[in-house]
Image (cartoon, grey):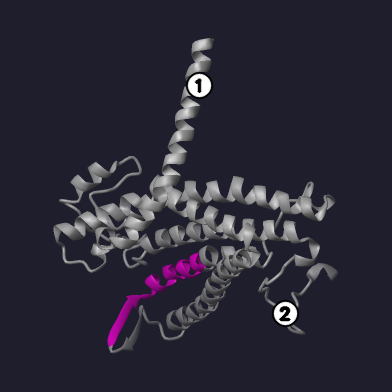
């Protein structure tokens, strides 16, 4: 028993030491990435050189690595520490992050209108003009079968879901199951929000990101990459890496851009991670400043007269 206890304490000590080391290295890693952008961004201008392939594999590896996680976490912790001293700085971070969610969400919401208009065009082309395809000419003709456009409607729906998720959170539009929350005091509510953001939102976003990141890249490059691949193995794969963007549709003439759904999943999870910190910061500031600060600087949509949601319950 004593040996087991000693082993458990030793493992715990090693884990704590590893976390502290990673936090310390986060500042060095961030500085190195900023001062040596070519080491991981050289592939953006693709010339199919060894340097391009090596930088691409570094992006794939570090994009879902513990190093990147600690860089972001250390940044947000330092920002929080500064914000404890200067509340205005933390309020500024909240406004920027919530503004990002609102801006992206409000823009992506127009995809719903595009989806409706495209469906109307499809119906007209099929039922009235009996055309098998739709051609748009803007210098370079865009000619696809109608089934391609019909399946592409899913992309608009995915954009609304993925890019409006944090926007809906900012606007308070998500359904919440309340067992305790409404019965407790204002400050207790803010403590619950802070715990929920750090204990649930951040780990969930990190876990999903780790698998979505490689899931996306497996649709873009070959040889396939895996979350279990160490950097050395990816550097070996860099010798043979090439672009192989997935363009297989579910039907012979169907939509061929399904890799875009995987890109949207990565963007969605990244925005959840960022907004988790914004929600934590807001909850902390409202907890410290009291009820008078509730919804401070919150940019919520305001419905004009006549735009209120219609309630069918009266029927």
Judge from the rendering whether residue 87 lies leftward or rightward of residue 97; answer left or right: right
What stretch of residues is rendered in magenta?
140-159
Q: Secondary structure at mark 2?
A: loop
Height in image: 224 above or below 266?
Answer: above
How packed is label 2: few (under 14 Cα within 10 Å), some, or many (20 or more)?
Answer: few
Q: Position of residue 276 (x, y in %)?
A: 58, 56
Compare residues 233 and 304 and report the one nearer the observer.
Answer: 233
Q: Which residue is mark 2?
A: 303
Asked whether residue 27 appears in the rendered view, the answer is yes
Identify the image quadrant of residue 252: bottom left
Judge from the rendering whether residue 297 lies leftward or rightward of residue 131; answer left or right: right
Identify the image quadrant of residue 144: bottom left
Q: Position of residue 314 (x, y in %)?
A: 85, 70
Screen quadrant of the C terminus: bottom right
Q: Which residue is mark 1?
A: 8
Q: Is 157 one of the magenta-colored residues?
A: yes
Compare residues 45 and 30 and report the one nearer the observer.
Answer: 30
Q: Secondary structure at mark 1?
A: helix
């Amino acid at each position: 028993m004593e040996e087991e206890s000693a082993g458990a304490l030793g493992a715990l000590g090693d884990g704590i030491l590893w976390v502290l080391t990673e936090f310390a290295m986060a500042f060095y890693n961030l500085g190195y990435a900023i001062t040596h952008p070519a080491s991981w961004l050289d592939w953006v201008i693709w010339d199919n050189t060894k340097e391009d392939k090596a930088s691409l594999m570094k992006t794939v590896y570090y994009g879902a690595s513990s190093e990147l996680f600690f860089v972001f976490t250390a940044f947000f912790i330092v920002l929080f520490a500064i914000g404890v001293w200067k509340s205005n700085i933390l309020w500024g971070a909240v406004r920027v992050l919530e503004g990002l969610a609102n801006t992206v969400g409000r823009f992506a919401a127009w995809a719903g209108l595009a989806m409706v208009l495209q469906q109307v065009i499809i119906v007209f082309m099929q039922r009235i003009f009996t055309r098998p395809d739709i051609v748009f000419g803007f210098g370079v003709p865009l000619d696809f079968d109608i089934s391609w456009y019909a399946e592409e409607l899913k992309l608009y729906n995915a954009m609304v879901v993925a890019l409006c998720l944090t926007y809906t959170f900012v606007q308070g539009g998500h359904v919440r199951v309340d067992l305790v929350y409404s019965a407790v005091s204002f400050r207790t509510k803010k403590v619950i929000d802070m715990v929920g953001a750090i204990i649930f939102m951040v780990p969930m976003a990190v876990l999903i990101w780790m698998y979505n990141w490689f899931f996306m890249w497996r649709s873009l490059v070959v040889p396939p990459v895996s979350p279990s691949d160490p950097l050395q193995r990816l550097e070996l794969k860099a010798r043979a890496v090439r672009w192989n963007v997935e363009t297989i549709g579910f039907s012979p003439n169907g939509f061929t851009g399904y890799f875009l759904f995987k890109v949207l999943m990565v963007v969605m999870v990244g925005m959840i991670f960022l907004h988790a910190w914004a929600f934590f910061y807001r909850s902390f500031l409202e907890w410290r400043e009291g009820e008078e600060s509730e919804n401070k600087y919150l940019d919520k949509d305001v419905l004009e007269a006549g735009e209120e949601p219609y309630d069918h319950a009266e029927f």
